[in-house]
Image (spheres, rainbow, N blue to C red):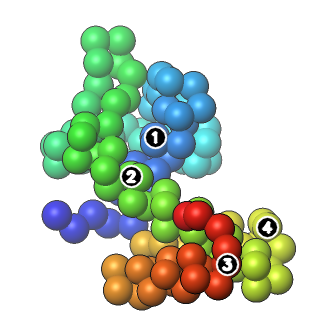
Amino acid sequence: MVIQESGEMYLETIYILSRQSGSVRSIDVAEHLGYSKPSVSRAVGLLEKDGLLRRDETGALMLTETGEEKARQIYERHTVLTKLFIRLGVDEETAAEDACRIEHYISDQSFEAIKAHMRKYGGEQL
């Protein structure tokens, strides 16, 4: 299943917010991303339709197993790329912003090569 960049951003945001507070509402996503509530509602509907997200009886957003796996992959790309850029001397804010842009477009092959390089020469676990 191919997900648009914006859909990936929503999944990653819901994943991050759920790790921070447990329960995520559409308004939390809107505030975090700086998007309008109607935009978030539309995106949530599309993610639900694709089987990546569901709402519980209180309206809280919950990632499905498939949605959580995809969100975890996106988040891993974001964190690994951010660490790489920081190691290269980029300031933390710019590193995170650039990682956010690249995480949606980098191939699996290139990303795995970056991880292998960082494991070999970085001396830290990813």
Distance between the alpha carbons at the discs numbered 3 and 2: 25 Å
- The quarter of the image holding the C terminus is bottom right
Image coordinates for residue 27, horizontal then vertical, percent: 52, 30
Q: Earlier in the sequence, mark 4 or mark 3?
A: 4
Mark identifier at residue 14: 1
Residue 111, quarter of picture: bottom left
CA–CA distance in space, label 2 to label 1: 8 Å
Above or below, comparing residue 21 to residue 4 in the picture: above
Of the two numbered discs 2 and 1 on the same chain, state the one appearing first in sequence.
Answer: 1
Amino acid of disc 3 = Gly
Q: Residue at x 59, y 64 (%)?
A: 125
> Dots 1 and 3: beta carbons under 8 Å?
no
Q: Local crowd at mark 3 within 10 Å, few (<14), some, or many (≥20)?
A: some
Point 78% across, 66% down: residue: 93
Q: Does the residue at mark 3 contact the one at mark 2 (Cβ under 8 Å)?
A: no
Q: Amino acid at mark 1?
A: Ile
CA gap between label 4 and label 3 equals 17 Å
Q: If you read the primary sequence from the N terminus, does the residue marked by circle 1 or circle 3 appear first? A: 1
Q: Which residue is mark 3?
A: 122
Q: What amino acid is found at the position of numbered circle 4 in the picture?
A: Glu
Residue 30 percent coordinates (x, y): 54, 39
Mark 2 / mark 4, whichever is N-terminal: 2
Neighbours of disc 2 within 10 Å: few (<14), some (14-19), many (20+): many
Q: Secondary structure at mark 4?
A: helix
* Residues tagged 2 and 1 counted as in contact (Cβ below 8 A): yes
